[in-house]
Amino acid sequence: MNDSTPVLSVVIPVYNEEDVLPQLFARLYPALDALNRPYEVLFVNDGSRDRSVAMLREQFQRRPAETRVILLQVNFGQHAAILAGFARSRGKYIITLDADLQNPPEEVGKLLAKLEEGHDYVGTWRAKRQDSWWRKTASKFVNAIRDRATPIKMADHGCMLRGYGRSVIDTINATRENVTFIPALAAIYSSNPIEIEVKHDERSAGESKYSLYRLIRLTFDLMTGFSTVPLQLFSLVGLVLSAISGLLVIYLIARRIFVGPEAEGVFTLFAIVFFLLGITLFGIGLLGEYIGRIYVQVRQRPRYIIGAVLEQTPDAPRHDGT
């Protein structure tokens, strides 16, 4: 690779992936070499506590011309790590890839071909997804909520093997939102998007970093970050319940006047009150999500802090080893 300006940048967030990194290195670089395009790989270490940093340093020493390592000070999350990679990427085309090898590195060429055809965003969906049943079920549930509550339309929001044109990346880099979902932003900013099918393998080592809690958080980020429909729906529900409650009060007053006081139906009233309280508390929580986003935004804290960057200086000798 003799061109100092890469055509392709591959951004890979890394968090406690020491078990899978050797396999990733062994498969990634041959796959990218076979593309015959100048490229760079940006590994973004997201505060790993295992040997990931040491292994990334070793890989940088082996392939300094094509490898750049960004070390974040602490764990900021997957999307913040990807944004850090976007900010330092130099390629005309940028492809994101998880380090866990569930999306094969050999699929990068498929996305690059679509980008070179003129598409500025290449979304993906996972064929024959190799995940546990509960993760598949949870993803289907989140996809259904996203389709109905936001204007974002994508087949599979959980697949991070995606391709971006430089214009889309520059727009994402200029976005000042603190809470972001990168594929959704790209879907909004792109003028010629496409979605393709990619392979999906079982995780060969390590464990998934996405817990049930993080999936729930992702759902709330999608709903509150890209749509006000949840607030509108809740306002409608509140209006209907208020009308029903008003009719119930009128009925109870009329019953007391014409039938007289009685203790019958007390528990039914309790059930109705508890139901209404539950709806109210849910609404307060939903409103809190929106207020929380405003709170995070107005603090103007950085989305990530870079501790160090390992990269070859422009005038340093290049290395073509594997």
Image (cartoon, rainbow, N blue to C red):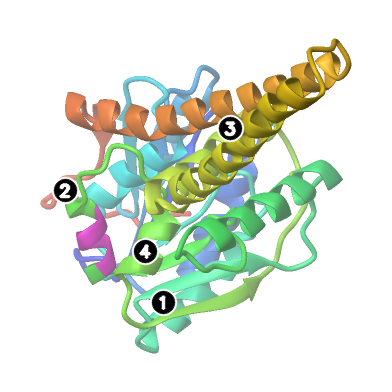
Q: Tags 1 and 3 in contact by the CB under 8 Å rule?
A: no
Q: Of the residues under marks 1 and 3, which one precedes in the sequence?
A: 1
Queried whether the magenta region covers residue 170, the answer comes back as yes
107, 23: nearer the viewer: 107
Mark 2 / mark 1, whichever is N-terminal? 1
Q: Does residue 121 lie above or below 248 as drawn?
A: below
Q: Which mark is residue 36?
A: 1
> From this viewpoint, which residue is outermost toward the front?
258
- Residue at image point 50% right, 69% down: 123
Mark 1 / mark 4, whichever is N-terminal: 1
Decide whether residue 186 is among the magenta residues: no
Alpha-carbon distance for marks 1 and 3?
38 Å
Location of residue 165 (image quadrant): bottom left
Q: Image quarter for residue 163?
A: bottom left
Q: Of label 4 and label 2, which has the lower sequence position?
A: 4
From the image, tell me which residue sits under label 2.
316
- Distance (Cα) linking label 4 and label 2: 35 Å
Callout 1, which amino acid? Asn
Task: Kindly identify which numbered label has been placed on residue 186.
Answer: 4
Q: Marks 1 and 4, Cα distance to the nearest angstrom?
A: 27 Å
Residue bearing the label numbered 3: 214
Instruction: Determine whether the residue tagged by mark 3 lies in a helix, strand or loop.
Output: helix
Q: Where in the figure is residue 26, as x and y percent of width and height?
A: 60, 51
Q: Residue 195 location, x and y as percent?
A: 54, 76
Local secondary structure at mark 2: loop
Q: CA distance from mark 4 to mark 3?
A: 21 Å
- Report the span colored magenta: 168-172
Q: Amino acid at mark 2?
A: Ala
User: What residue type is disc 4 on?
Assistant: Ala
Residue 208 image point, x, y percent:
67, 35
Looking at the rendered structure, the secondary structure element under dot 4 is helix
